[in-house]
Image (spheres, rainbow, N blue to C red):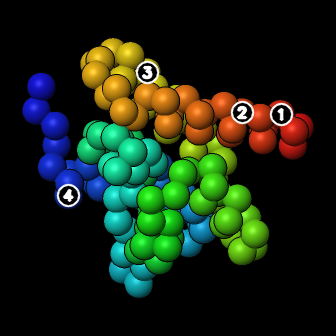
């Protein structure tokens, strides 16, 4: 199965997620260009699949580096930004389903499972 290229994945993530940065909610328009951000960083085994990528602004993508998604989510909230927690949960769940379907991703699975547990715990505590 052919995976779309980076530019195609960015367009798909942008249309799937809307025209705002997942992390800071800035509009992704001509003044704030969109980049693809790997929810599970590649250095932790995250694949370059659409299910693992979200549209984010360059500032957030660069500042996040290789931090885990929940760590960066907490940092964004500390900075007074309004990250889209529901979108992050959906992307993590979609990635888990894609890995279950396609297999592999031995390195990404433990990190993904940990991020999903931490996010679920945060959401329960907030409710």
Q: Secondary structure at mark 2?
A: helix
- Cα separation, mark 3 vs mark 2, equals 16 Å
Name the spot of residue 6 as percent of width and height, x first: 20, 54
Question: Which label sits in the foreground, 1 or 4?
Answer: 1
Badge 1 local density, few (<14 within 10 Å), some, or many (20+)? few
Name the spot of residue 14 as percent of width and height, x first: 38, 55
Instruction: Quadrant for the N terminus, please.
Output: top left
| Residue beneath the point at 10% across and 32% down | 2
Does residue 111 sit above or below 76 in this rendering? above
| Residue beneath the point at 69% across and 70% down | 81
Instruction: Quadrant for the C terminus, please.
Output: top right
Q: Earlier in the sequence, mark 3 or mark 4?
A: 4
Asked if disc 2 and disc 1 are in contact, CB closer than 8 Å, the reply is yes
Q: Earlier in the sequence, mark 3 or mark 1?
A: 3
Instruction: State left or right for residue 30 relative to residue 121.
Output: left
- Which residue in the rendered view is the most extreme toward the left? 2
Q: Earlier in the sequence, mark 1 or mark 4?
A: 4
Query: Circle 2 is placed at which residue position?
Result: 120
Query: Circle 1 is placed at which residue position?
Result: 124
The dot on residue 7 is: 4
Q: Secondary structure at mark 3?
A: helix
Query: Circle 3 is placed at which residue position?
Result: 97
Looking at the picture, tell me which residue is in the foreground, 94 or 74.
74
């Amino acid at each position: 199965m052919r995976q779309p290229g980076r530019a195609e994945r960015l367009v798909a993530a942008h249309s799937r997620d809307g025209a705002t940065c997942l992390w800071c909610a800035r509009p992704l328009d001509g003044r704030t260009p969109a980049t693809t951000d790997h929810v599970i960083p590649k250095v932790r085994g995250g694949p370059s699949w659409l299910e693992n990528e979200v549209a984010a602004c360059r500032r957030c993508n660069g500042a996040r580096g290789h931090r885990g998604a929940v760590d960066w989510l907490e940092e964004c909230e500390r900075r007074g930004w309004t990250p889209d927690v529901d979108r992050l949960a959906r992307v993590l769940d979609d990635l888990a389903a894609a890995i279950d379907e396609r297999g592999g991703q031995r390195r990404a699975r433990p990190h993904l499972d940990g991020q999903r547990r931490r996010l679920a715990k945060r959401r329960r505590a907030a409710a």
